[in-house]
């Protein structure tokens, strides 16, 4: 199943639950606009290489398009469209006045120099500058893009429009208008939702074990924050694109982060056993946090998952066929559009700070994130009980209903 088919299937299931009318169904199954761009970049060896980039603007009935930019060799038009659909449902499930968009460039950032990445980012910013803007479409970081990428994008956009426009992008460095707490927001939001799930299911946090797939922005901060939100828990397994490690006694997370920074991988960390990425997903743990890429939990491994709670820090890690298996086996899945929505929520806080030119304290950011995440978790949990469906379909039901209502007011 390609990601777009996954997104459409998830949408159809929820549309049936809320008995969505045919008009809204048709409108909400396609992006409003997809821009495809070719970006010529002079590489360090003097050669010109042309990269393919995309910006998908899925739906803006509730507000400006919003969504990250991904740099990865496997980026495709369908993946970007699916990710932009998920952003539409994510901003709606959090009740933010935003729509959904997503961007991506087919490239291998790990094999590129900083200079090449800067020229690529500036080229992409020039290519899509006509369709983005603080009131139109606001990009942010995603896989293999970061605050430096956002800073280059902002600077190039400012040069294009001839004035400073900090609200055109979020996830910027704090020194140039970024929000305090944006770097840890996805993980913090994920841990707030996970804490609520432990409470709702009556599972004690003391002694809980955690496996995390992916140790980048989302995954590494989940590990760092685990004990704050799940007191007495321990992170026993982590992975990255190079491999996975396991230690049933739990890791010293601060030392693990240091090790990853120094060596570029989690493998080789003292006292840990090396396991495969597949093994990590099926470990006997209390909580599994997929925090890498989509399509990881499939019909082939879903029945082997032993974790009681799955918190999807990543976008699209579980295929629809696996959802039913997990649900039947009594697993509680906090779906991506809820579990990782802390990132876009603090991105919206960053937009508000840009509009008012008034920076918020870290305390204020964290308090408002807490409030939003708790409310959205319970909106979805209540809908799940009301409709007798799992949390993903419930999250979609809440989100699709909100977008469809906005669409109707505006006349489609
Ligand atoms: P990142 O680039 O910082 O980290 C990605 C991590 O995944 C890296 O550690 C990489 O080594 C690892 N990885 C890649 N392939 C893997 C594999 N096959 N097995 C195990 N690990 C693998 O990216 P990120 O920002 O942390 O994003 C991770 C996921 O979270 C993505 O699905 C992204 O869309 C989602 N997400 C991120 C944010 C955010 O604010 N960063 C917000 C919402 C959702």
Image: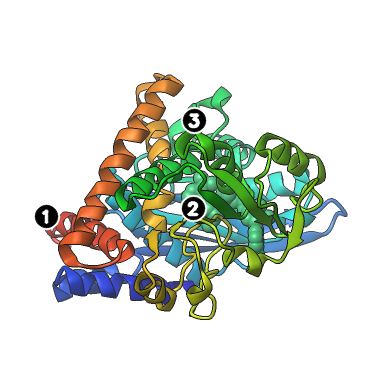
Across and down, in percent, residue 271 comes to 79, 48
Across and down, in percent, residue 97 comes to 27, 43
Q: CA distance from mark 2 to mark 3?
A: 17 Å
Residue 135 in view:
yes
Per the image, the residue denoted by label 1 is: 409
Contact, CB < 8 Å: mark 3 with mark 1? Answer: no
Q: Residue at x 40, y 65 (%)?
A: 331
Q: CA distance from mark 1 to mark 2?
A: 33 Å
| Mark identifier at residue 313 | 2
Residue 90's place in the image compared with 154, above or below, is below
Q: Few, some or many C-alpha atoms within 10 Å of disc 3 (few <14, some 14-19, many ≥20)?
A: many
Q: Secondary structure at mark 1?
A: helix
Q: Secondary structure at mark 2?
A: loop
Q: CA distance from mark 3 to mark 1?
A: 35 Å
Per the image, the residue denoted by label 3 is: 181
Image quadrant holding the C terminus, namely bottom left
Q: Residue at x 64, y 54 (%)?
A: 237
Query: Mark 1 vs mark 2: which is more N-terminal?
Result: 2
Kindly tell me whether mark 2's CB lies below 8 Å from ligand 1.
yes
Disc nearest the viewer among 3 and 1: 3
Disc nearest the viewer among 2 and 3: 2
Nearer to us in this view, 71 or 50: 71
Q: Is residue 318 left or right of residue 271?
A: left
Q: Residue at x 59, y 63 (%)?
A: 283
Residue 353 in view:
no
Contact, CB < 8 Å: mark 1 with mark 2? Answer: no
Query: Mark 3 vs mark 1: which is more N-terminal?
Result: 3
């Amino acid at each position: 199943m390609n990601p777009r088919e996954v997104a459409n299937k998830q949408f159809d299931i929820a549309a049936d639950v809320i008995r969505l009318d045919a008009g809204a169904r048709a409108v909400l199954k396609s992006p409003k606009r997809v821009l495809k761009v070719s970006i010529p970049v002079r590489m360090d060896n003097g050669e010109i290489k042309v990269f393919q980039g995309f910006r998908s603007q899925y739906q803006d009935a509730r507000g400006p398009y919003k969504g990250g930019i991904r740099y990865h060799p496997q980026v495709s038009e369908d993946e970007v469209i699916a990710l932009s659909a998920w952003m539409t449902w994510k901003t709606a499930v959090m009740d933010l006045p935003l729509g959904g968009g997503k961007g991506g460039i087919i490239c291998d950032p790990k094999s590129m120099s900083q200079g090449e990445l800067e020229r690529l980012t500036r080229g992409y910013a020039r290519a899509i500058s006509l369709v983005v803007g603080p009131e139109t479409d606001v990009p942010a970081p995603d896989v293999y893009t970061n605050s430096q990428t956002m800073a280059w994008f902002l600077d190039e956009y400012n040069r294009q429009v001839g004035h400073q426009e900090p609200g055109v992008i979020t996830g910027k460095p704090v020194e140039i208008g970024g929000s305090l707490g944006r770097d840890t927001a996805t993980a913090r939001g994920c841990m707030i939702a996970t804490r609520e799930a432990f409470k709702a299911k009556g599972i004690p946090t003391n002694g809980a074990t955690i496996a995390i797939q992916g140790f980048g922005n989302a995954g590494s901060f989940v590990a760092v924050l685990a004990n704050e939100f799940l007191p007495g828990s321990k992170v026993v397994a982590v992975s990255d694109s190079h491999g996975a490690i396991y230690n049933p006694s739990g890791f010293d997370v601060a030392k693990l982060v240091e090790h990853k920074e120094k060596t570029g991988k989690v493998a080789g960390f003292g006292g840990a056993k090396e396991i495969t990425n597949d093994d990590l997903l099926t470990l006997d743990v209390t909580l599994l946090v997929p925090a890498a890429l989509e399509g990881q939990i499939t019909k082939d491994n879903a029945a082997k998952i032993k974790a009681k709670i799955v918190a999807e820090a990543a976008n699209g890690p579980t295929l629809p066929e696996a959802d039913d298996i997990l649900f039947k086996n009594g697993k509680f899945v906090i779906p991506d559009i809820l579990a990782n929505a802390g990132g876009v929520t603090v991105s919206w806080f960053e937009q508000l700070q840009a509009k008012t030119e008034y920076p918020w304290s870290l305390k204020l950011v964290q308090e408002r994130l807490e409030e939003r995440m708790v409310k959205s978790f319970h909106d979805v949990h209540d809908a799940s009980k009301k409709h007798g469906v799992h949390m993903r379909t419930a999250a979609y039901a809440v989100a699709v209903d909100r977008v469809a209502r906005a669409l109707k007011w505006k006349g489609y």
